[in-house]
Amino acid sequence: MTRNPALLPLLATIIGIGFFSAMDAVMKSAALAVGAFSAYFLRCAIGVCLAAPIWALTNLRWPERHVLRIHLTRGVVGAFMGLSFFYAIVRLPLAEAIALSFISPLIALYLAAILLGERVEQKAIVAAMLGLIGVIIIVGGRIGRERMTEDAALGLAALFLSALLYAWNLILQRQQALVASPIEVSVFQNGIAGSVLLLGTPLLLVIPQDHTVWIDLVSGAVLTILAVLFLSWAYARAEAQVLVPIEYTGFLWAALFGWLMFDEMVTPATVAGAVLIVIGCWIATRQTPPEQTAI
């Protein structure tokens, strides 16, 4: 029996995305209370306070210039990606927002070829297309049963901006994972994104008065660190094109957390789209049998 070398990175990616989806849910709750900007900035600040001591105790070493450049790029991209995403999920159901963001893996597959020199296999393209069709079914079901409001339209616009940035983020995640430890990635991701957002705090920052909002923010920071640790470990051990389609499982997590926390119901169109998403993930992660060689 041939062992699939991508199995452990695959499982780590699924778990990491689960942590991210749980984070999205608690952050939606916090953003509804204090706004997307304040929720995201405070989560980044808390994340740095939690991750930096661990980094200092394990392997405190300032990154080399080329590594720092990757940290800076991903941090800046992450700042605007996260802000636009949290703005969107305040205005859209969580599961559908996640589903709409799945244009990112499709874009990322081609960015992996351009920026990382990876050869995009046919099965990865088929998997991405199946996932995208599943998303179209979900969105079509929503548009067919609801009238688009101005607030929802703004949410969609922010979500598509976030999706474009997230596609770039997926590639940067692979580059970053190859040159830095997971805890270092977490420290710089939160620190740089928070530093960018710091510029807007004089005008936009709202300090929560309700202790439950602080619980959400701390929970969001912890879940983010766990997600980054799992995903950084996975992306250091498998190509982006293998792991990117697994991003589609985020919809299943989001549907669960949206139902549990916000009573957001899952429609038949959502289920049908999810089935295609899962099939796409299965195709992407199937291992091609190795060719027989003479001994």
Image: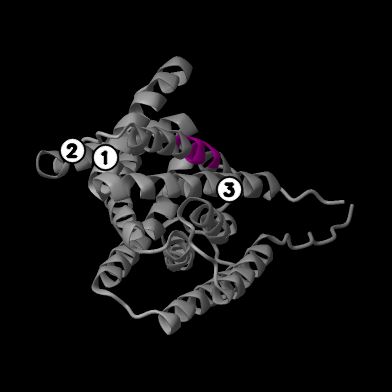
Report x, y in % for residue 159: 34, 64
Dot in front, 2 or 1: 1
Residue pointed to by mark 3:
13
Residue pointed to by mark 1:
41
Residue pointed to by mark 2:
198
Q: Are marks 2 and 1 in contact (CB under 8 Å)?
A: yes
Report x, y in % for residue 32: 31, 50
Res 150 quadrant in image? bottom left
Q: Secondary structure at mark 2?
A: helix
**How far apart are labels 3 and 1 at the CA level?**
25 Å
Three-letter amino acid code at the position of disc 3: Thr
* Viewer-proximal residue among 137 and 165: 137
Residue 181 can be seen in this image: no
User: Bounds of the magenta span?
Assistant: 225-230
Q: Which mark is residue 11?
A: none
- Is residue 106 shown in magenta? no
Three-letter amino acid code at the position of disc 1: Phe
Dot in front, 3 or 1: 1
